Every structure is written in C-alpha cells, then in structure tokens.
Amino acid sequence: MAEPLTLYKLMILYMLDQTEVDLTNTLLSDFFLGKDYTTYFTLQEALHELDEAQFIRQEASHNNIQYNITPAGRESLHFFDNKINSSIKAEIQQYITDHSIPIAATASAMADYYITPEKKYAVHCQLREKSIPQLDLTLNVMNKEQAEAICTNWKEQADEIYMMLFDRLLK
C-alpha cells in the first residue's frame, strides 16, 4: 500500500482523469473529507505538491479554484494506477455519478468575459477535451449584453463552431 500522502495524490489524479470537467477545490474537499480519508490541510498539501510537480494545473475563476490533470500527471497515474485499490476507485466513480460530474468522453465548452484596459469587453471561449484546450478563442465586443450572449451561445454551440472552423481551415 502507498504512503497516505502519495495515495491521496494518486486519488486526486484519478478523480481528475475520470472527469471531463475541471474539479473545484470544494468538490475535492467534499469527497476527501466526506469519506474521512484525510484532513483539509493534508488535502491542500497534496494539491500543492501535485501543482508544484506540474501533475495538475490550477485555474482561478470567479473566486473559485479549479484543477485539471496535466499530461505528466496522467503519465504518472498510468504508472502507479495499481496503487489505488478497486474499492477506492469505485467510491470515486460513485461520487462522480452522484454529483452529476460528467465522465470524460466528450469535450467541454467554457466561456467567460472580462473588461479590457480599454474599457471594452473581451470574451474568452475554450473547447477542451480531458482538460486539454482544443480551441482557444478571445473575441472583443462592444458591451456586456454581447459578451453574455456569446458566453451562452458558445456553451450550446461550441462543437458545431469548432467543426465549422476546422472544416473551413482545412479547405
């Protein structure tokens, strides 16, 4: 059996690898603390060490920290996957299902907007597959209403837009 901190790191990597979306610190804490695996501070230590080793990436968005697995993290998990017993994997899978967290399979669309130094709005749209950006696009718009509309429409039409761009650029 792996050392406790090492096991927590592997469990975090496994959770991140199984989901198509980034996981928040709140969701990770809920799982680890709810199952009495470890304390909040030990979990934060494991997350910090994984980030320092570049096995995960953390992104701050609207006062929330989200985590995703890096290729190096995925490779490390592949080597040590057998250190996580099947009952823990089953608990992770059940947690993902119970909390309606999408399982990795399809791409996830993310969009957000911000005010530029020129006092205009910029909309940042991304299409990710297993946390790896497939398309990263920033559009400058005139007002907040346009920014909000693009964010809403992006989340609904990202796959279609991506395929249209891909087809057009390959012609």
Image (tube, grey):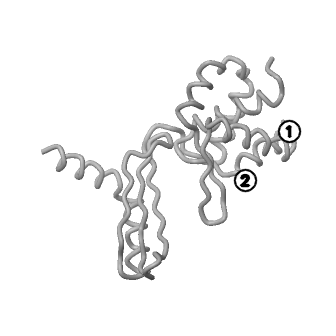
Q: Is residue 10 above or below residue 39?
A: above
Q: Position of residue 139 (x, y in %)?
A: 35, 67
Q: Which residue is mark 1?
A: 38
Element marked by disc 2 = helix
User: Taking 43 as reference, is 75 left or right?
Assistant: left
Badge 1 amino acid: Thr
Label 1, label 2: how far apart the Cα atoms are? 14 Å
Mark before the other along the chain sequence, 1 or 2: 2
Q: Position of residue 60 (x, y in %)?
A: 62, 58
The residue shown at (54%, 44%) is 102
Element marked by disc 1 = loop
Q: Position of residue 6 (x, y in %)?
A: 77, 27
Quarter of the image where the N terminus is located: top right
Q: Is residue 80 above or below residue 110?
A: above
Q: Which residue is mark 2?
A: 26
**In the orientation shown, which residue stands out farthest toward the left?**
171
Asked where in the image residue 80 lies, by quadrant, the reply is top right
Badge 2 amino acid: Thr
Q: Is residue 167 above or below residue 87?
A: below
- Taking depth in this image into account, of 94 and 42 the one nearest to the observer is 42
Q: Which disc is residue 47 wearing?
A: none
Q: Position of residue 48 (x, y in %)?
A: 73, 43
